[in-house]
Amino acid sequence: MKRNFDADRPFLENEFQQAAWDDTTGLRPDALKQGMWEIVEANPELPMILLRGKVFSFLAENARLALNPHSIFSGKMDLGVQFGEFATQGVYSELYSKANAEVLKRADPGLCAQKELAERMGVGFGVADFWHTMPDWAEILRLGFPGMLQRLRLAEEEKRRAGTLTQEQEWFYRSAAEHVQACISYTGRLRALAAKNDLWEWEACLAAIAQGAPQTLYQAMQTSLIYLELEEMGVERGRTLGRLDVLYAPYYRKALAEGASREEIKDLFRYFFLRFHAARRFASQPIAIGGHTEDGADGDEELILLMLEVYRELNIRNPKIQVRVHPGLSEKILRFCMELIRQGKSSVVFLNDETVINAYGRIGIPREEAARYVPFGCYEPMLPGMEDAMIGASWCNMAKAAEFAMNGGRDPGTGETLTCATPETFENFEDFYSAIKTHVRQILRFIRRAIAGELPHTMEINPSPLYSASIASCVERGKDVFGGGMRYHNVSIKCFGVATLTDAVLAVKRFVFEKQEIGFEQFRQVLAQNWQGHEMLRQKILNDPCKYGNNCPEADEIACDLYRCIAEEVVGKDTGFGGKYRLGGDSITNCIGFAQKMGATPDGRRAGEPVSKNFCPSAGMEKNGVTAYLESVGKLDYADFADAAVVDFTLHRSAVEGEAGLEAMLALLRYAFRKGVFALQGNVLDAAELLDARTHPEKYRDLQVRLCGWNEYWIHMEPVKQDAFLKRLQAN
């Protein structure tokens, strides 16, 4: 079929927001919701894994459909998702929400109350993470939906013949088969719609994948989209498409061998990538490239460059690109990715293979297994088919330790104590710093208790049979991912605000105990008054050059010591449920949300202002440029961070112009990775342009910036986020 992407694009950009739902194809979301709860009410004693099979099949087989004749991936189902700046969740997610609230409050109401208090204080949260998943895409593409179904049935029958099939295994196989069968049924519904509208190319593709594994690049892409759409009916989110340069290379090479032109293949990727852009996926859809295959060979360089060319041409932020970097990675690929960032297409992150593998080693995973990792989520590594890492299980605001230590362990906002009391005042810095580290440890121990309180109940809350059906070990064991089906069931604890905590510790050290410009008790009162009447002291503290992120030995030593203290409480600790705790150092937007619940801190930060994100200095405190910043962050031990530790850079556009500028960016990457930095991402921006975009947003609709792990369009960002970028640019 003759296609014209440029002519189709206006009909693709907003195809989810403006979907023409066909009422003859199924039920509206309100009717689906009613039908779902009728199934739930009619089966009060049914185990959750079987209940989900019934509900899932009902939704997949009865949701109304829409067709976009301008797309080669034409169909979609209506589950009540709202497509604004980011897509919301649909009706199926309500089943999780209800089960989660009811099960946990019944299991441990006291712990639930403590967790609610911790969130009100801005400390953080600890939960079981069901929403970050990594389907085994290699298995999905190798088997297709019919092959996945056959594998489930054969595994069940083998256990039945051997007399070892337990009731729980029987439940798993029944529900997983229902889920995969629903994928096949949904594919059939789409095929009927394609035939009705005479879309023969799409119909032929759907017919093929309904009957077997994908054989062409188009079929592989369509299989991936159908699986993703159905897995994400609930709260699960397939937070990677896998390493496309490896997964799609055989289909790419086959297409070339059969006479397809490079331009025809690029056209497939244009429609494919724009589908994710149109779907308004929260935090963007990750795709991974780079690294090496299990036999030591690189991925397909030619395919990588083709995909990057399409990405540059489309000028979109979604999907986002995650690059595994090792010494053998093509210079051409690195230069292309850096050029994207320089052009403002900065939805790119680089991961340092050697550091990632070493970090896995620190939690007991051997090098040959760790080398198989795939980045997913924002930049977190995970082992496909082997590991569930619960990367969204917690975020911990370490800056809160300063607020607790200044107030005897109490939260000044609520007046309550979450973990432990410490002295009300201190005669020397050593005792104050000891209290800081006590609160760091106690916060992390509380978070571990919070997570441990949920892990025993995962199968009551949200088993995930479709996700599990893609994992060979789950099928072999007859167990759900959340019921012990994978080899490694690790859990991640993410800590942020450490730069703010470091600067707060330094402020007390220097201005209370060394310079003696203010007493400890008086300083506490100043913070309680949010610095009112003490602006001169605040400015002195803000302008003190000893701040983290400026290659200041005193500041860097404290930051490294605090991170060691954090690592001792997290890295490799046993979860009690077949896995280890992994440490992460990213914040996403919690550096804003949690900080809004905090009072003022000794570093000069006012009540409610953001704390430091990721491994960045506090906003506006990066005074000595990017080289000094890299020297500071390069002193950390990144082998502690198996969950990821991303270093953000922000450069002025004028500093990276021409060939010399591109070489400087590449040198920055090489220097950071020689220092052992785990991951690197950044922005090339112009402060004047950002300010002008606030006044004239209509001129800057495509201006995007890299946040903590995804990109947003500048004109849609909240002012508090914009201010953080401007402060960092202006500080340099």
Image (spheres, helix red, strand yellow):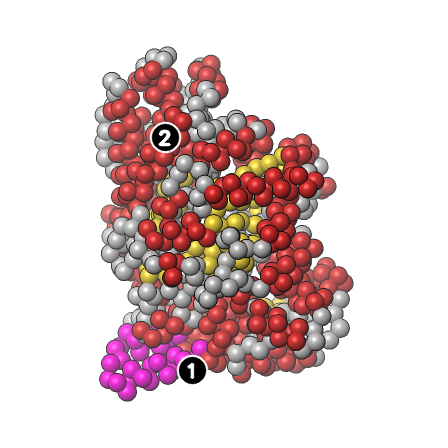
Closest to the observer, 233 or 136: 136
| 170 falls in the magenta region | yes
Mark 1 neighbour class, 10 Å CA radius: few under 14, some 14 to 19, many 20 or more: some
- Name the side, left or right, on which 421 lies relative to 295: left
The alpha-carbon separation of the residues under discs 2 and 1 comes to: 57 Å
What label does residue 557 carry, if any?
2
Q: List the residue tagged with mark 1.
A: 150
Q: Quick check: 432 above or below 657?
A: above
Label 1: state its secondary structure.
helix
Mark 2 neighbour class, 10 Å CA radius: few under 14, some 14 to 19, many 20 or more: some
Closest to the observer, 48 or 244: 244
In the image, the segment drawn in magenta is 148-176
Residue 722 figure quarter: top right
Q: Residue at point 30% right, 38% down? A: 565
Quarter in which the C terminus is drawn:
top right
- Name the side, left or right, on which 407 lies relative to 188: left
Q: Residue at point 26% right, 29% down? A: 434
Estimate the x, y position of residue 474 in percent, counting from the top left: 35, 71
Label 2 vs 1, first from the N-terminus? 1
Q: Residue at point 61% right, 39% down? A: 664
- Amino acid type, callout 1: Gln
Estimate the x, y position of residue 357 in percent, counting from the top left: 40, 54
- Does residue 513 appear anywhere in the picture? yes
Label 2: state its secondary structure.
helix
Quarter in which the N terminus is drawn:
bottom right
Estimate the x, y position of residue 91 in percent, counting from the top left: 48, 63
- Amino acid type, callout 2: Glu
Magenta residues: mostly which secondary structure?
helix
Q: How many marks?
A: 2
Q: Nearer the viewer, mark 2 or mark 1?
A: 2
Disc 2 and disc 1 in contact, CB within 8 angstroms = no
Q: Residue at point 75% right, 66% down? A: 4
